[in-house]
Image: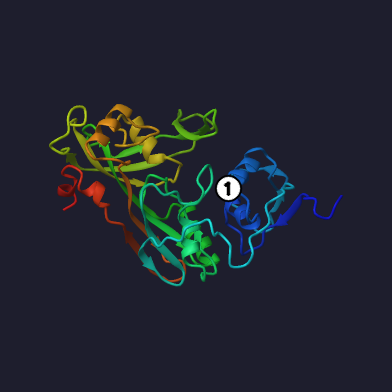
Amino acid sequence: MSADQPTVRHLTVDAETAGQRLDNFLVRVLKGAPKSLIYRIIRSGEVRVNKARARAETRLAAGDVVRVPPLRLAPAPAAGQAAVHVPARAFEVLYEDDWLLALDKPAGVAVHGGSGVAHGVIEQLRRARPQAPLLELVHRLDRETSGVLLVAKKRSALKALQDQFRQRSTGKTYLALVRGAWPARRKVIDVPLQRYLLPDGERRVRVVAPDDPQGQRALSLVRLRGTVAPPPACAAPADAVASLLEVTIKTGRTHQIRVHLAHAGHPIAGDDKYGDFAWNRALARCGLGRMFLHAWRLTIRHPAEDRTLALEAPLPAELRNWGDVARLLE
């Protein structure tokens, strides 16, 4: 075998890396590997954790052995030229200290590159802050969702914050505009969800029966803020009643709020995966050009200090100024 022939590697997870997701671990060790490649080798079973297949979201523990298949990657760029193709971008900062950074993520920007996305928030942030020794996503938001996004600046902060998310000790509240009149008495959605893939490999989520062994419990708490009148120029069906909701999630399942609300018969305005597509088109003609889902408030324990952080991202202007939404936020 030639010296430059790629070979299988077996990497042992150390204490500093413990708690990291498998996909994020591979992004770090396979420098230069496209995210699409990383997810493909995980899905195919070429990556193993302790000799067993694992999922992208698998949390690694100290002492785990990760099998990495032989991969021939493009040479790393020369020093000072890393990530030249990634534009630097400074996002609005809601809070920052030596341990963490809370950003107000705009809609339309993925949190990271991969699956056809060249780069996302974290790559652009690293490009804008080349002096930062570490910047890692603590959690994720859908591409079309705006709002509070946490980034860790130290490995210990990343682990501590991710532990809070896993233990469901964070407080996460979203604002969502949905079709129809939401019944004020309906305050809990406790319906299990299951992830699946479309034939083209795109990820989707569906509601399953409570006794389905593949289902994961998903719990959402809903509070009605009030009904929303659309802009005066809107024509049917966009002039149908809509409701502004506060949704607090007690579990962090993929697309949880979107699927729960659609299953309840009240899809989110502008949702291109689970929504009412005819209504979405009418809303777009009336000036709502994105999904109306916003990560509004996030409460966490500081990863290094004995205090609570209550973070809030104001509703973006394009949502706040649609119809009479602003009236319900006063």
Q: Is residue 302 left or right of residue 115?
A: left
Q: Residue at x 50, y 51 (%)?
A: 119
Residue, x 51% and y 34% (percent of image)? 202
Q: Residue 292's spot in the image, x, y percent?
A: 30, 42
* Image side of residue 276 versus residue 99, left or right: left
Left or right: 179 in relation to 87: left
Above or below: residue 120 compared with residue 300: above
Which quadrant of the view contains residue 134? bottom right
In the picture shown, does residue 46 fall above or below 91? above
Between residues 39 and 127, which one lies in front from this camera angle? 127
Q: Find the residue positioned furthest to the right.
A: 1
107 on left or right of 64: left
Residue 237 appears in the figure: yes
For image coordinates 42% across by 66% down, the residue present is 302
Figure label count = 1
- Closer to the camera, 10 or 106? 106
Residue 247 placement (x, y as % from top left): 31, 45
Residue 190 appears anywhere in the view: no
Q: Secondary structure at mark 1?
A: helix
Q: Position of residue 49 (x, y in %)?
A: 68, 48
Q: Position of residue 246 (x, y in %)?
A: 28, 46
Q: Amino acid at mark 1?
A: Lys
Task: Please tell me whether residue 198 is drawn above or below residue 6 in the rendered image.
Answer: above
Q: Residues within 10 Å of mark 1 (few under 14, many from 20)?
A: many
* Residue with the mark numbered 1: 35
Q: Quadrant of residue 150?
A: bottom left
Q: By what rule are the colours in the image chosen? A: rainbow
